[in-house]
Amino acid sequence: MSKVHVFIVGATGRTGGPIARAILQESNKFRLSILVREASKDKPAIKELTDAGAEVMVGDISDPAEKLESYLKGVDVLISTVLVMVDQKPLLLAAKNAGVGRVIPSDFASTAPKGAMFMHDIKLGIRDYIKELGLGYTFIEVGTWLHVMFPPLHSATDTLLTHKSYPGDKKQKTIYSTMPTIGKLVARIIADPRTLNQAVVAYDGEISLGEIWAIAERITGEDFSDYYHVSTFIPDEELEKGTQQMQNVVKRIVADYFKSLYIRGDNTLANAEAMGRLDARKLYDDVPCADVEEEAKKHYASGAVPASTSLPGAAVLDVFKKAE
């Protein structure tokens, strides 16, 4: 039986990297190609993947249509993990013209209905475009990334990425995910005919902020009870202004997620099942779940520095106001 040819765009990113590594570990099932910019082809992260068996295609998602189609000839599964603001439509159209059998768009977000989050609505629009093209697809939703749920240490600065605050009452459960687990689950999902033309929720478990913070206090020895409660988010008019200024866009994104996850309670297994998502845990019950305490130890041992450090300081320092 021939191997499934997988093509990843964004294979060295925070989401794409674990997926690429998990696929390479299944070399008896998959052949992996990755799209790499000319300026990045000699970077250590690329060498790590090529040493493990990945094939490099030098190019860019913004290349002309005919070049994109040439990259995708003979590909069975296209996985995109580019930033949500990057236009995926030319790549997806090229996949259609090249005869790709299944596409996984850059989704990997929490479960939520249309209108809950503006960034999520962009992803839902891409889903509609894929269906319009008649492409085979699998939409993969994930839980809240576990590392962003841990409270920052007192020594950290209060920012939108390391917020010393919490929304809601800390009792709302939410699905959570870790990067290595998502990689393993994606490797199973893309080879499974049951997931073709379906939306799948891939995750480790369900947990509340209160449970997470209690674990963090045990691991760090710090008491986070002085971190403040945010009950009210940005007024609607400021959200509109935020589309014009980077710092407000960041705040709007965080506000959207906070409302959806912890106020509305969108991202639960019950809601995912009600919306028709397949449960990856039921499909692949042999894939182990991450141990939350061990993940907490690794998180704080790493220095607990947020993944994105390229945002303007004014953006991330514009934190939410304390509840009255």
Image: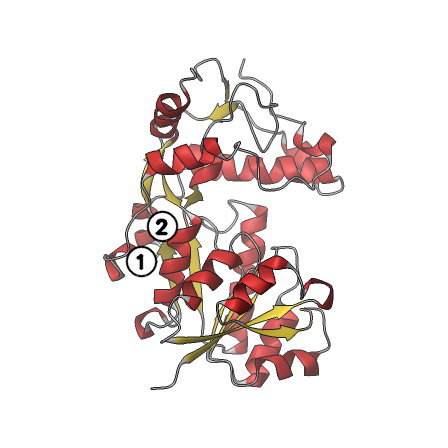
Residue type, numbered disc 2:
Tyr
First in residue order: circle 2 vs circle 1: 2
> Do the CB atoms of the residues marked 2 and 1 lie less than 8 Å apart?
yes
Residue 280: numbered disc: 1
**Residue 24 point in image, percent of width and height:** 44, 67
Going by the image, does 96 lie left or right of 295? right
Going by the image, does 249 lie left or right of 167? right
Going by the image, does 162 lie left or right of 187? right
Choose between 236 and 20: the one closer to the eye.
20
Image vertical order of residue 314 relative to residue 267, above or below: above
Q: Quadrant of residue 125?
A: bottom right
Image vertical order of residue 204 relative to residue 25, above or below: above
Q: Residues within 10 Å of mark 2 (few under 14, many from 20)?
A: many
Residue holding disc 2: 203
**Residue 271 point in image, percent of width and height:** 34, 47
Going by the image, does 310 lie left or right of 24? right
Residue type, numbered disc 1:
Ala
Residue at the spot 26% in from the left edge and 60% down from the top edge = 284
Q: State the CA–CA distance, disc 2 to disc 1.
A: 7 Å
SS under mark 1: helix
In which quadrant is the C terminus drawn?
Answer: top right
Q: Quadrant of residue 307?
A: top right
